[in-house]
Amino acid sequence: MTAMFDAALRWLNLGAELLPCQPASKRLVAGFGPHMQHITTADGARAWFAERRCNLALVCGQGFTVLDFDNAELYSVWAAGNPEAAATYTEQTRRGAHVFFTGSGRIADIPEGAEVKQAGGVVLLAPSTVGGFVYHPVKLGAVIQPLKVGFSLLSESMEPARAVVKRAEVGGDTLSRVKSAWNTLELAQSVT
């Protein structure tokens, strides 16, 4: 079969729910989404990742939390200062890294420039390709570690979360300006 299909089977064996993304893209295939249909069987994985050769994505929040760094230098600084947390399974992305943990909840101290992907979050997995870059493990053989930080559910009081949210300075890239303009937690709470 293919490396993508083999990777999909490994994630399914860990209890993950998967999504197909368009080949060479981060865009989900039409009809799939974090709250829609998920791939949970080997037959589904074969159809999407071996036959159609789609990119592979993980639905977060199904027992998995991902710390998403969009900057390789920021990830390196964080990893050097947090060697125990950084020892978990990590994949290098085109711009930074995805750091995988088992468990879910709210991380007490999110590094500025990183995002926590949980319920409803989706991240691309190795060996997906975007812009000619192939996602790959940072350290072969690393195992996903449990998240060992304090958590609370989104439905609980958001006051502690507001205290640790650090806004990006205005004037950076587009993503930084959007993140600085919107408090994602407040927005999610107002929608629910």
Image (cartoon, rainbow, N blue to C red):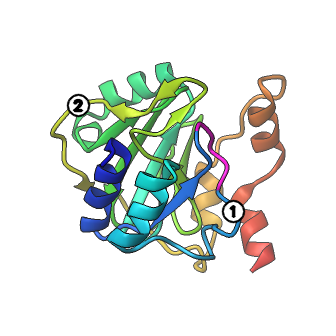
x and y percentages locating residue 86 in the rendered image: 29, 37
| Left or right: 83 in relation to 52 | left
Q: Which residue is mark 1?
A: 185
Please determine whether, in this image, residue 117 is positioned above or below residue 180: below
Residue 72 place in picture, x, y as percent:
48, 22
Amino acid identity at mark 1: Leu
Which is nearer the eye, 148 or 30? Answer: 30
Q: Position of residue 2 (x, y in %)?
A: 33, 45
- Magenta residues span 24-28
Q: Does the magenta portion include 45?
A: no
Can you tell which quarter of the image residue 80 is in? top left
**At x 72% / y 57%, what residue is drawn?**
184
SS at mark 2 in the image: loop
Query: Is the residue 62 above or below the residue 80 in the image?
Result: below
Q: Is residue 184 left or right of residue 35?
A: right
Closer to us: 104 or 144? 144
Other-residue count near label 2 (Cα within 10 Å), few / some / many at <14 / 14–19 / ≥20: few
Residue 139 badge: 2
